[in-house]
Amino acid sequence: MIPVDIVVPVTDNPGATRRCIDSVLASSNMRPFALVVVVDAAPDRDLTNYLQPLQERGVVTLLVQPSPQGYTAAVNRAFDLHRDRDVVVLDPDAVVVGDWLDRLAQHATERGVGVVATFTSRSGSATYPLPQSDNALPPGQTVATLDALFARANAGIAVAMPAVRGPCLYVRRGCLSMVGVFDASPLGSDFGVEVDFCMRAQSAGVRNLLAADVFVGREGRAATPSREVDELSQRVEGALDRLYPAYAAQKADAANRDPLRPCARRVDLLRLVETQQHILLFVSHPWGGGIRRHMSDLAALVADRCEVLYLEPAAGNTVKLHWPRAGEGFSAYFMLPDELPALAQLLRDIGVERLHFHHVHLLPRAVLDLPSAVGVPYDCTLHDYYAICPQYHLVTAEGRYCGEPDAAGCAACLALRPGQWGLDITQWRGTFGKLLRGADRVIAPSQDVGVRIHRYFADLAIDVWSHPEVEPVPPPHIARVAVLGNLSPEKGLHVVAACAREAREQDLPLVFRLLGSTTEPIPQFPDAPLTIHGQYVDVDLPRIIAAERPDVIMFPAQVPETYAYTLSVALASGLPIVASSLGAFPERLAGHPDSASVPWNAPADVWNRALLAAAGMSGNTKPASVLPPVEVSR
């Protein structure tokens, strides 16, 4: 059998490269392979010391580029080494396990296949658990356990894709002979050469596949994309669109169909089936608020021994079953009542042991039949009065407490505001009386709720349990910075925006409040620690400042101010002031005991340092040794 060349192009990060090579050599494949390591220019000394013994033993073929030539040149050199062999291109931070190569090679034997890619954790055609995301490995999982799950859940399954990319690409020699090697020249960059190659292959009638039964790990976490990387990505995508007019439509079609989703969901289900944790299902509406917080708190409390799934309404009679844990992507949809048996069977298959009803708003009535369909016990928590009032809160149309009238009064209310499922008040309470009586536990968060519900269901045992709450952490002291007047670029609009951005990036205890309006949009909360009050009448400004209670007032003008009436108001407030050392500001602030002047063209970190100092929080910012000096006068 002809060996496969496994090519690892090395640029930097020798530690990850060594672990990649170790993983290849430790894997267990029937298919013979040769490991080719291509180093772009002089290799790291430690990496050289690692590779040379392997080369001397014939375990690795080492190719060293005489000068830096980049990824494409390195891969193409390896392509040219053995012109009768298929090639696997493996990114140097990739980690492979088990018989990964055998599974890839099996997909590559399909007729008309040119390139085969894999699932991975990040920076690939198919990422898991979340698509197109920088994923960490799920808790309790390793690359080996995830790969084994993919191999079992999706055995023999591959999905056709318009184009695929790393960290692992199996390239057929016949495809290379037909369309040529990687080519960076049309894109002006190594970025995107795999996609360009796949599109050329597709144009020649060759298929590109994603092997759903192989998972390849990646070392570490992806770096935060820089502006340069984002711009490069956009340029390359634009070039690909021009080179291959069908590319954009094919990408959009693949995104809409999401053909890889079933593959990822099968792995999700297998993980749930095989978990050692107990599995609970919480039933509720899809909104946030107190109910969702309580559900999240409960899930956190039992996280060391239980997995919690949520069931909530999606649209119409469709419900959504999903795994709410951060970083998980599992969700499945069912139309009730028609698909109640399928939902119940799935819950049995994955081992759900208990249901917990938190609310039924927007859910189809058939959800009440779920406990008997699954055959498991259940609990009910009374977050409001849904069991006795179709309006949930004992509320009138005017938003006031209804006083809990008799059945005739409730009927009159429902005549004007029909309740869920079209039930009258007797049917409603009968339905929920049956649900509550069948529960293992009916839980009320306060005595008042228990007493009110008990008036309607006198035979019902109700447990009063306060909601568990994490002890609140005292809020940190935050310096509040006020900026007065309508803000334009010449008045310092861009300075304030930059200061807010820098405060967010450096996690500084600063928030900015513009008492006025802006001449152009700037990022606001939650994207930046900045909010805008809006226009005001001049005579009201002192009262507004008093109500806002800022710690410091900022005047970031970028042109020489001749006077500034707002500065007069600021001086009268007695608050610390930080202003540009430009125009009339230094002159007017000369007698103010708590003022600081900053060069008008100072960067944001200098402004923020001065603001923190003026607010008496200089100890909460970076050490002075790493910050530029501030020209301050007091």
Image: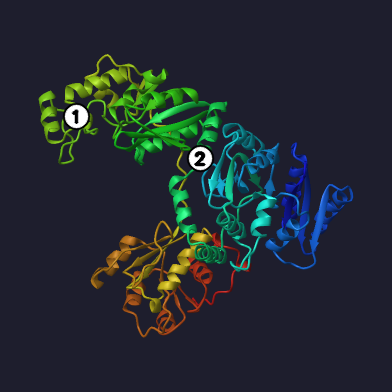
- Rendered view: 607 above or below 548: below
**Colouring chosen for the image of the structure:** rainbow
The answer to whether residue 491 is above or below residue 605 is below
Residue named by callout 2 = 328
Residue that label 1 marks: 422
The earlier-in-sequence mark between 1 and 2 is 2
The location of residue 180, given as percent across then percent down, is: 66, 60
Mark-to-mark CA distance, 1 and 2 = 36 Å
* Res 432 label: none
Q: Amino acid at mark 1?
A: Gly
In this view, the residue in front, 171 or 513, is: 171
Taking the spot 25% from the left edge, 16% from the top edge, the residue there is 458
Left or right? Give the position of 544 relative to 67: left
Q: Specify the quadrant that holds the N terminus.
A: top right
Direction from residue 253 to residue 448 in the image, left or right: left
Residue 594 occupies which quadrant of the picture? bottom left
Whether residue 14 sits left or right of residue 510 in the image: it is right
Q: Give the crowd class for mark 1: few <14, some 14-19, many >=20 residues within 10 Å.
A: few
Of the pair 33 and 235, the residue shown nearer to us:
33
Relative to 127, is 80 above or below? below
Q: Is residue 144 left or right of residue 423?
A: right
Q: x, y percentage for residue 260?
A: 51, 42
Residue 455 appearing in the image: no
Residue plotted at (76% across, 57% down): 38
Observer able to see residue 560: yes
Amino acid tagged 2 = Glu
